[in-house]
Structure formats: C-alpha cells, structure tokens
Amino acid sequence: MKKLVDKLERERTLSRREFKDLIDGRQEEGLAPYLFQRACVVRQQLYGREVYMRGLIEFTNYCRNDCLYCGIRNSNRQADRYRLSKEQILDCCRQGHELGFRTFVLQGGEDPYFTDERLAEIVREIHGRHPDCAITLSVGERSRESYRLLFEAGAERYLLRHETANQEHYDLLHPASMSLRERLQCLYELKEIGYQVGCGFMVGSPGQTTDCLVDDLLFIKELTPQMVGIGPFIPHKDTPLAGEPAGTLEATLFLLGMLRLLDPALLLPATTALGTIHPQGRELGVQAGANVVMPNLSPVGVREKYLLYDNKICTGDEAAECRHCMQNRMRGIGYDVVVSRGDCAGFIQNTLTGREQANPEEQEESYV
Ligand code: SAM
C-alpha cells in the first residue's frame, strides 16, 4: 500500500482501481502515518509551516433547498431562522479586519431574500471598505449571470461543495428537485468566470461507498479547483438522516492526506465538523495535510441557529476568542497562522515554475 502512496505523490493521480485499493486498505498498519508524513512534506515544500486563517460569516440560515442531511433544510420547522442585515455583515467584517483577518467567507443557505442586487451591494460595500481583503462566497447554486455580477462586485472565490460526484449517491441525499448535473455545471461556470473555486464533499455520508469516494477524487482531479472542503457527515436530529452514523475522523484524515498528494497546491480546510467529532480534529487535520482554518466571525447571538449538524462547536465564543483559540491550537502543533489573503494561485504557480512574483504586494503576509 505504501507504494500506492508513493505513486500518488509522484504522479498526482492513480487509476480507479488503485484509488479504491488505497482507500479500502487504509487501516493497514503504519499506512496512515506514512501518508500523513508524505502529505506534510509535500505541503511544506509549498507552504512551509503556514496555515491560512479565513473569517467565516454565516449570514443566513434560510434555505429554499431540502438536502436530506442538512439542519437548515427548508422542511426543518424546528430551525430558528435568521438573516443578518447588511450593517450586521459589515460589522462582522470590520471586527474581523481589526482582528487581522484578510479573507471573509460569506456563507448561507440559498435564501431568496438575497437577490443578486442585494448580495452584490453587500459584496461591493465590503470590497470598498476593505480593498485589502479577499471575499469568498458560499451561497449555493445561482445563475451564471448572478455569479458574474457578484464577481464584478468584488467576490473572487466561491465555495460550492459538489457533495458527491456519484449520481446515485447524489439522488439519495437530495430531493428530486436538485440535480448533480446542475451543481457540477455551476462549478464549471464559476471557474469560467474567473473565480478561484472550491468544491468538496462530506465523508461518511449515508450511502457513501468507496466507489463514491473514488468518483469524488477523479472529479476533483478533472475540475482542478483551488480549494477542497471536506469534513465528516454528522447527523442532525431534525433531518431524515438523524439516525445515521457520523463519518469518522480516521477516514476524513486519510482523505485529507490523499487530497494533498493529489494536488499539492490545494487550499484544504481543517473544518469545524472535524473539530466537532474530535476535540483535536482540526489539529489532526492540519497534521494530515490541511492548511486552512476558518474561525467563526458570526455574531454570537445567531451562532446556535446555523446548526447544520448536532453538537457544532464554538457556538458560544466571540470572534476574538475563536481567532485566538485557533492561533493557539496551531501554535501548539508548531504551525504559524497567517491572516493574509493567502492567494494560492500566484504564489504557488511561481513556486512550481520558478517564475518571478506577479505582484509582490499580494504576497505580503502578516504573522499573528
Ligand atoms: N448553501 C450553500 C451550499 O449549498 O453550498 C452553503 C451552505 S451549506 C449548509 C454548507 C455545507 O454544509 C454543505 O456543502 C454540506 O457539505 C455541509 N453540511 C450540511 N449538512 C451537514 C451535515 N449534517 N454534516 C456535515 N456537513 C454538513
């Protein structure tokens, strides 16, 4: 099995059969530590000991969709709905900026209140007030025109987990009104418009087989996103999948390690879900190959309402606490937290090709 890890590191891909064998054989003695060691070496060559910090603002939990796994799905009548006003969102950014954040991730359900005009206005305002910051959106499926407007307003990055690249599995996790084809189409459109894109999937979601995971890896290889967000599936008590088991720490870490070797330049978050299933989940995620953390900047009053799954961590902490907690956690395992925009594109391309920096100012990093 270690030979497959070596081959993945060398060739950045494997055949379908080999991917499957590696995932299925992951509990072989010593294999996971070996994978993590290789993943860390590969990451270190590009990113050193740096972990990028993004400020997450969960600005609405209204959602028109009904994904079977999600706590903010439309038919969950128990969900206490909220949406932040433009002023509240701007206030989160101001606070985040004071705390040193230079990337804001605006995430929410697919809330029809946030029309193109409203959302573009918010993005424009953040961009105007904080021109030194990168704005990432994670607001689901929208039209190409909408994505273009938001890009022109100043959003440069977009996170849209594909959730699963396997058709049958997708249909099992989503209502008939949602389609894998459309979701993937959105990702390609975002890329064409010029966004840095992030896709991703849950590990251990109900019905997920090794073949599904192989489909995910092959899809990621084809899409070549800048980011991949993965985390364990965690059941939510008021969803149809309430009684299903959660994904495991072990499988999630293994896949993080594989993703690092698949594409060394990837921005790979150690997610809140990982921190929820294990007290040191995010530290272990970084030690397996992740290089991004996303402390929460949402107002404490709404944190408990953005409950995608049960027992979500950090719902009672102020932004400053989250930021310092994360910094201490990363320092504790020997990593430097960096709050710069953390553009992978220019920096990594140049590292790989040995070219000069395109824009040296953008490479400036502030250590905190
Ligand atoms: N509406 C946007 C979208 O669809 O991309 C962003 C919000 S959505 C709630 C963010 C991510 O949460 C989803 O892509 C999904 O992978 C994750 N998620 C939802 N329910 C989850 C659960 N029960 N366990 C783990 N992750 C979950």
Image: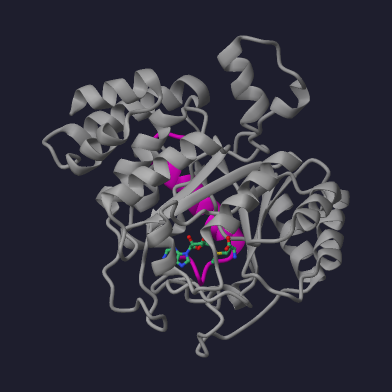
Q: Residue furthest bottom?
A: 77
Q: Seen in the image, is 28 located left or right of residue 342?
A: left
Please say whether residue 101 is visible from this viewpoint.
no
Q: Seen in the image, is 221 located left or right of residue 31?
A: right
Find out whether residue 322 is within the magenta segment.
yes
Against 78, residue 175 (above or below) is above
Q: How far from the left and from the top, in percent, is residue 7?
A: 30, 21
Q: How far from the left and from the top, in percent, is residue 37?
A: 29, 28
Against 16, residue 285 (above or below) is below
The structure residue drawn at horizontal position 28% and vertical position 78%, both measured from the top left corner, is 243
Quadrant position of residue 106: bottom right
Quadrant position of residue 352: top right
Q: Seen in the image, is 194 located left or right of residue 170?
A: right
Q: Residue furthest left?
A: 29
Q: How far from the left and from the top, in percent, is residue 226?
A: 58, 37
The structure residue drawn at horizontal position 64% and vertical position 52%, both measured from the top left corner, is 186
Q: How is the image coloured?
A: one colour
User: In the rendered view of the protein, which quadrant contains the C terminus?
Assistant: top right
Range drawn in magenta? 313-336
User: In the rendered view of the protein, which quadrant contains the N terminus?
Assistant: top left
Q: Nearer the viewer, residue 15 or 199?
A: 15
Q: Seen in the image, is 364 located left or right of residue 332?
A: right
Against 86, residue 349 (above or below) is above
Please say whether residue 245 is visible from this viewpoint.
yes
Q: Nearer the viewer, residue 146 or 297?
A: 146
Q: How far from the left and from the top, in percent, is residue 93?
A: 74, 57
